[in-house]
Image: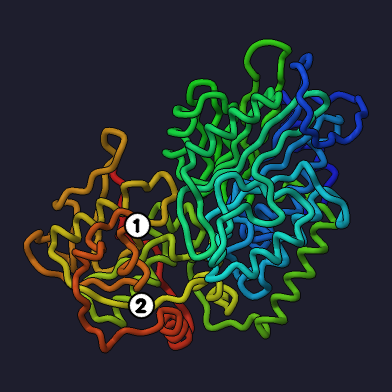
Amino acid sequence: MPATPRRALLHFAFCILHSAFLVSCATVPQPQPSTQTVAHPAAGRFKILQINDVYKIEGLEGGASGGLARVRTLRQHLESDGTPVLLLHAGDALWPSVMSKYLEARPMIDVLNLLDGDAAATDRNLLVTFGNHEIEKSDDKLLLARLAESQFQWLVTNTLHCRAGAACEPFPNTIPSALLDLQGTRVGLLGLMYKQENSYAQATDVQAAARATVASLRQAGARVIIAITHEDMSDDRKLAAAVPGIDVIIGGHDHLYTQDHIASTWITKADADAKSVIVYDVTVPAEGPVRTTPLRVVVDSTIPKDPQVDAAVERWLAALSAKLGGNTALGTTRNLLEGTEPAVRGRETALGNLLADVARQQMQTDVAVINGGGIRINDNIPPGPITKYDMEGIFYYANRLVAFEVTGQQLLDMLRNSVSRADAGDGRFLQVSGLVFAYHPRDGGFLVDASDVRVGGQPLDVSRKYTVATVDYLYLYGNDDGYTLFADGTRPPKVNVGREADFRTEVEAFVTNAREIDVDVDGRIVRAP
């Protein structure tokens, strides 16, 4: 926290005021939910504070960036003129994070319950939808327990709870839609997750669910419709085009800030872990379209932490440390090991190089590739100690190293798929070892030519065979991220099977034995003009 938090808060307020968020002095009662049908009101106003894909309650970079204590401060500031504020979370609230893994996601619910400043009250203006990670566990026990503890609204429109021998039905302690009365302005909300299913959850077609729910909310008197979604930006664009009547799409799943405007619909995604938030100031005239423009606010140390929320965060950090038995150092790094998602999912990093080098060394292959989405720390390891907690973050998911053989053409196709969504922060982006390559922006996409790739210092030969090391997740499920090589019918057979090993064990042994790591960015992946 900066030495002069009052000055920092005033600076933040100044920025908001000069971004057209004008403050009045009116005092108004808190809005209450309602389902009565009313005529269109006179001009109304409310605000939206958007977050999505928040895994770390404490924030990033040792708490210097993001963090839910700062989100509470922002909310208080936006509410300070008496205008109603909706705090909307577009999914991936419970998992994955090291804290949620070891403390069963209880810290996240505890802190979200505090974002209205009252640990005991129901927060009807905080609405959260399901992300894919909400249903990642093998059974529903922990999810149901956390839903029951929530003192806010879980808004779940198209995902049903399915139990053996019974018909699928809404998850307990969730609502399929909401119709809120914000000082006379009726606002309808729905929560949508991309189509998928597991043993206890089934997410149905997004557009069909949206079309029916939007119609129902409009019929009930909604003047503004907000869809909170958890799906790719491309699918949000399709939703806006296919379902008229949605004014704002509050999007999650993509972890990097982006926005778009399709017809009359705004679509926004904030940076993951509340590194940034999106703020809307919404004006609803008596007649005519809703007026609003999103504003991205970077959440950094200039915004003070709310003391009550920060105290809760510190208590949970202490509980995690006790659970892990301390945070011992395994070795040190001479260079910055970047692990934030924009880095490992979009360019070469020293951390990615370290992991890929260890994989190639252990599996004794020509090349190693590690998908950026599998590096879960979403934080940087500064020069100095590499700790047990760092390893927990990097290896949130257990993976074994495997190896297989490909042709040069297949390797080239993998590299092309790797960079195909380099600007979207997609987990398919590969960190590499044993090769160097360049890619070029072209016609709205990216191009990798065979002449751009060198393996072991030699030009890529598209007809030659190469051995490749990777993690078993990519080998088994890479087809889901566009690596068609790993489809069930085309997956190449393994090689060097006797060297397969737990990835985390090998990296920890490498760091411990080396004592000091000197891996840095060395030009393996180049984005050419």
Q: Is mark 1 on a helix, strand or loop?
A: helix
Image-based side of 219 in relation to 121, left or right: left
Residue to which mark 2 is pinned? 358
Q: In this view, does 62 lie above or below 254?
A: below
- Compared with 198, 359 (above or below) is below
Residue 483 location in percent, x, y? 28, 57
Outermost residue, top side: 287
How far across and down, in percent of the image, does residue 232 sit? 45, 44
Quarter of the figure that contains the N terminus: bottom right
Q: Nearer the viewer, mark 1 or mark 2?
A: 1
Quarter of the image for residue 347 reads bottom left
Q: Is residue 299 visible?
A: no
Which sits in the foreground, 438 or 231?
A: 231
Q: Name the residue under label 1.
A: 480
- Above/below status of 272 relative to 31: below
- Give the mark count: 2
Residue at position x 69%, y 81% in the image: 323
Measured from the top left, where is residue 306 in percent x and y? 82, 52
SS assignment at label 2: helix
Query: Residue 283: x percent and y percent?
Result: 71, 21
- State the residue at coordinates (49%, 21%): 263
**At label 2, which amino acid type do we have?**
Val
Which residue is most to the left? 463
Query: Pointer 1: residues within 10 angstroms few (<14), some, or many (20+)?
Result: few
Residue at image position (28%, 43%) is 446
Q: Answer few, some or many: residues within 10 Å of disc 2's Cα (few below 14, many 20 plus, some between 14 and 19).
A: many
101 lies above or below 516: above
